Structure formats: C-alpha cells, structure tokens
Image (spheres, rainbow, N blue to C red):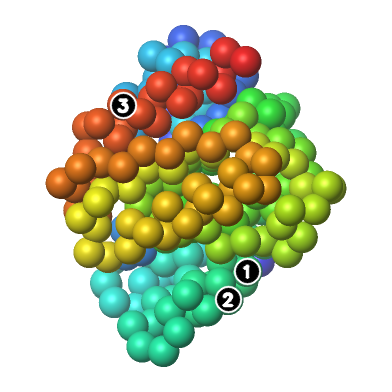
Amino acid sequence: MTKLSGPMLPPASGGVPRQAVVLLHGYGSDGNDLIGLAPHWQASLPDAVFISPNAPEPCRQFAFGFQWFDVSFDGDRLARRQEGVVQARPVLLEFLEDLWSQSGIAPEQTILAGFSQGAMMALHTGLSLERPLMGIIAFSGAFLPPDGFGSAHLAKSPVCLVHGDMDEVVDPEHSADADTALRLAGYDVSYHVSPGTGHGIAPDGLAFATTFIERVANK
C-alpha cells in the first residue's frame, strides 16, 4: 500500500507534539498547498504538529499534482466520488494509524482538515472511526457517508463545514446537505457559508474554522 508523506511543521511551542493537524489538499494539488493553513492555526494549537501529505496518486489532469481519487466529468459524479473515497480511505487510515502509534498522539488530539476532494476524504474517513477526533474541518467539500454511518459503534466527532456560495466546482448545496444529514444523526456541526466566494477559502471562512478549532481544543 502507498505510504503518504508531505510537508510538516513542528509545534510552534518548540516542544514535543501533543496534538496533530492533518491537512488534505484538493484535486491536482499537493501538500505544499494546505500546509499554508498552519501559520493561521499555530497560535490556537501551539503544541500541534501540522502535516500535509500528498495524495497517493499522480493527478491525471495536472502533470505535477496529486489526487485522492480519479475525477470523472461525465455520468453519475456523486456515485464516482463515493467509489473514490471508499478506495482511498485505507491509505489515509494507515497514515493516521502510523501517526498515532509513532507519535503517541491520540485521535482525540487530532484534527483532520481538507479542501475540496481532501474535504471529502476528511469527512468520509474521519467519520468512519470508532474513536472520536478532536475535530473534522471540511472546506468546499461533500459528505460521502462511510459504511455504518449512523450506527452506535462509530464515533461522533465534531464537524466544521465551510463553503463559498458561488463555488463553481463543488456545489455549495453539498455542504448544506452534509449539515442536515450530520445534525439529524446527532453530530455537533458548525456550518458557515462565505458570501461571494467561489472554490476557495475566504478570510471569513478561515476565521470561522479557527474559532471552531479554539472551541474543540478547549473542551
């Protein structure tokens, strides 16, 4: 199985990592993209190590990027995404389990965050776990339920959803639908829509996610 790796930033405190933030980039990008979120969150999580692994597959559409799964622009796109996250989940799960076993950091002290395709992976994989994460943050994504979603044996990690209302790549309604589905299943959900924002992370969306981090880190 492919081993994930990518950019990493040590804790701002200079001490031993006590928390972890795993950042999952979008389709056609790489870990250097989302590691840029770390400076915005280090003050809130000074003892956290930030890791932004490259997705496991070279991107078919962009020569220098990576993909969590292949994107098809024809047919049933939602079904293809569901198939994609299921196939990619074991690689990400192995990465997380290696991180926890090697660092001693617990899932409860881990935030899993992603953008676009990475957000789909964060939601699908994070909500498939039997132990809760500190939190899951999904920017401009969609919720593709894991097997057993809604059952008692899966943990209910707190979730933050952020989406631009003018996103032309991933329909903003996907996050609205995720908000509804997760709340109905009993999850703690924070949901924010960034007005006038396309497929990206606006300052207000980043601030909303930062507030979410501060809340779950101080529980």
In the displayed structure image, the side of residue 59 where residue 133 appears, left or right = right
Query: Picture coordinates of residue 111 (x, y %)?
Result: 55, 34
Residue 203 % position (x, y) = 22, 32
Residue 26 in view in this figure: no
At label 2, the amino acid type is Glu
User: Circle 2 sits on which residue?
Assistant: 83
* Residue 77 visible, this angle: yes
> On the picture, is 92 further left or further right than 45?
right
Q: CA distance from mark 2 to mark 3?
A: 32 Å
Residue at the extreme bottom of the image, as rendered: 75
Residue at 58% over, 53% down = 181
Task: Give the residue type that dot 3 points to.
Answer: Ala
Relative to residue 109, is residue 87 depicted above or below? below
Residue at 56 percent of width and 72 percent of height: 82
Q: Quadrant of residue 92?
A: bottom right
Q: Quadrant of residue 54?
A: bottom left
Label 2 sits on a secondary structure element that is helix
Residue 46 in the image: x percent, y percent? 46, 14
The label shown at residue 207 is: 3
Q: Residue at x 52, y 79 (%)?
A: 79
On-image quarter of the N terminus:
bottom right
Circle 1 sits on which residue? 86
Above or below 10: residue 3: below
Q: Nearer the viewer, mark 1 or mark 3?
A: 3
